[in-house]
């Protein structure tokens, strides 16, 4: 993966801090030991720790500050995060965000074998672009995020909404599964039937650059 290698340690440091924050958000009483472990352990261990803490979280019982489509500020301009079934976000500074991705029933299920409102993923969102909606080119471009090329495990890009249309503005997303399940998703998506596990090394979410739903109502998936 190309990009500004000097920026990657900064990305990794921030990812560790946000993963620690995510564990704290889904834990009713996480202590300092959990926060330290989340910063030091790889993503799979963090997801396992989050799974242990996520039992009381549902769409009807969200941690404070999470909402379906918060506003984020990027380069001094405000954008609105897209409303996606089952997704809730907590906006951070400089356009970054953390998210909770739940199973949904309408308009489609994300998982074939999970109950409605069950938590499937923790999500970390880095602001950035995917020029031409070309996923492969976006992963290689040093211009894709403020820190250079997207770091490893950022398997999906999703667009934002703005007054003039967000265009290329959006977020690179890292989905951390907090349980094992079989992916379902919208019709025709490339992950239909894929086994998602917190311990596997495959992509955890669809590797694609996807416009905001308001600009792509059919949510037709596909890579370029």
Image (cartoon, grey):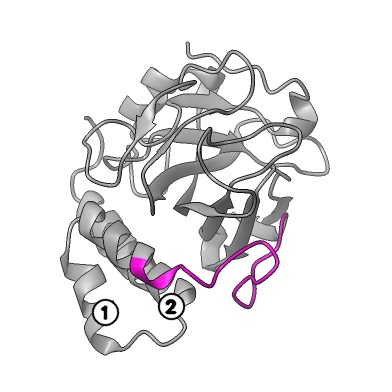
The foreground one among 149 and 16 is 16
Classify residue 34 by image quadrant.
Answer: bottom left
- Note whether residue 76 is visible: no
Q: Is residue 63 magenta?
A: yes
The image shows residue 119 at horizontal and vertical percentages of 52, 55
Q: Residue at x 45, y 22 (%)?
A: 193
Left-right relation of 58 to 24: right
The image shows residue 64 at horizontal and vertical percentages of 63, 78
The image shows residue 138 at horizontal and vertical percentages of 41, 26
Q: Is residue 61 magenta?
A: yes
Circles 2, 1 touching at the beta carbon (< 8 Å): yes
Above or below 158: residue 14 = below
Disc assigned to residue 106? none
Q: Specify which label sits upstream in the sequence, 2 or 1.
A: 2
Circle 1 sits on which residue? 34
The image shows residue 167 at horizontal and vertical percentages of 68, 30
Above or below 36: residue 197 = above
- Look at the image and tell me in which quarter the N terminus lies: top left
Q: Give the structural element (helix, strand or loop) at label 1.
A: helix
Q: CA distance from mark 2 to mark 1?
A: 10 Å
Circle 2 sits on which residue? 27
Q: Give the structural element (helix, strand or loop) at label 2.
A: loop
The foreground one among 89 and 52 is 52
* Range drawn in magenta: 52-68
Left-right relation of 36 to 156: left
Q: Residue at x 22, y 79 (%)?
A: 36
């Amino acid at each position: 993966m190309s990009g500004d290698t000097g920026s990657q340690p900064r990305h990794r440091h921030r990812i560790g801090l946000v993963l620690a924050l995510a564990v704290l958000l889904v834990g009713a009483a996480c202590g300092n030991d959990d926060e330290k472990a989340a910063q030091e352990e790889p993503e799979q261990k963090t997801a396992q720790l989050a799974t242990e803490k996520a039992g009381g979280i549902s769409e009807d019982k969200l941690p404070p500050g999470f909402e379906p489509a918060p506003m984020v500020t990027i380069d001094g301009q405000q954008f609105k995060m897209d409303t996606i079934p089952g997704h809730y976000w907590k906006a951070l500074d400089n356009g970054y965000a953390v998210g909770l991705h739940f199973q949904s029933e309408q308009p489609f299920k994300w998982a074939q074998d999970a109950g409605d409102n069950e938590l499937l993923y923790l999500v970390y969102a880095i602001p950035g672009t995917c020029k031409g909606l070309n996923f492969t080119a976006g992963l290689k471009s040093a211009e894709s995020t403020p820190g250079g090329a997207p770091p490893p495990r950022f398997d999906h890009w999703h667009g934002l909404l703005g007054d003039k249309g967000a265009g290329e503005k959006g977020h690179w997303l890292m989905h951390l599964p907090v349980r094992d399940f079989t992916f379902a998703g919208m019709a025709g998506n490339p992950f239909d039937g894929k086994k998602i596990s917190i311990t596997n090394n495959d992509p955890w979410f669809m590797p694609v650059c996807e416009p905001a739903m308001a600009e792509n109502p059919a949510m037709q998936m596909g890579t370029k």
